[in-house]
Amino acid sequence: MSILVLTSDTLIGTPATGNLEYNGQFFGTDSNASRAQLQRIVQGTSVASTSGTSIDFTGIPSWVKKITVMYNGFSTNGTSVPIIQLGSGSPTTSGYLGSASQQSGSGVSVGNFTAGCAFCNTVNAATTQRGIFTCVNLSGNVWVISGTGAWSDNTVTTTTSSGVTLGGTLDRVRITTVNGTDAFDAGTINIIYEG
């Protein structure tokens, strides 16, 4: 049986292997010369997706390796497909390799998207959507994205996957549409990030 004991709120001078230290945040040590911060899960501030043509979550720390995007009751006033774009300094608007599919009583439809990771394959202005996306750092500046969702009328489920190589370290996530001009008119969106 292991016991966790925190004996100080300051970092020890010379870390010993296996120590767990506390100084406002937790640090783990794997050698006498190495100390690594143990990152926590951070939730962003929920944003109402009721106006505007894009929503940006910026200031994401460089240590982040996984981002979860959640949306509930999300809708736009048009038929352009909603997408997620990752970025370094600014959103990356091209170079995504992936597709989105949706299944309904009439069958399955699939579309390919290069401007971002799509929420779905087609959309109409009367539909609200809810779902979750996971964006994971593969290595360097390469990110892969996958997600699932459903429409409010309970007739359509969606599945999507994509990947993109950024020009630098990720620091932002944008939610917009393929045409960039359809406006949000319902719902909320938020993110969680972790190291």
Image (cartoon, rainbow, N blue to C red):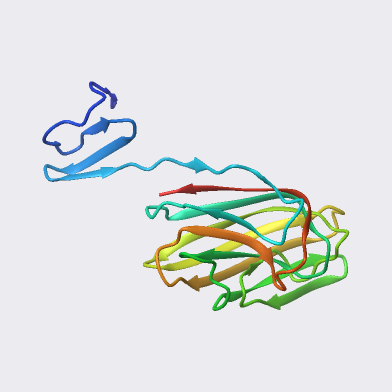
Q: Residue at 72% across / 73% down in the picture?
A: 179
Q: Quadrant of residue 150?
A: bottom right
- Observer-nearest residue: 116 or 102? 116
Residue 76, position as x, y percentages in the image = 79, 60
Above/below status of 132 relative to 109: above
Residue 86 rendering spot, x and y as whole percentages: 53, 64
Task: Report the side of 4 relative to 175 (left or right).
Answer: left
Q: Position of residue 18 (x, y in %)?
A: 20, 37
The quadrant in which the N terminus is found is: top left
- 179 lies left or right of 135: right
Relative to 9, residue 120 above or below: below
In the rendered image, which quarter is residue 33 located in? top left
Residue 123 sits above or below residue 150 on the image: below
State the image quarter where residue 183 is shown.
Answer: bottom right
Residue 24 vs residue 16, the one in the foreground: 24
Q: Which residue occupies 43% across, 72% down? A: 167
Q: Residue at x 56, y 52 (%)?
A: 68
Instruction: Answer left or right for 171 relative to 93.
Output: left
State the residue in front, 182 or 107: 182
Residue 107 at x, y = what percent? 83, 71
Viewer-closest of 172 and 96: 172
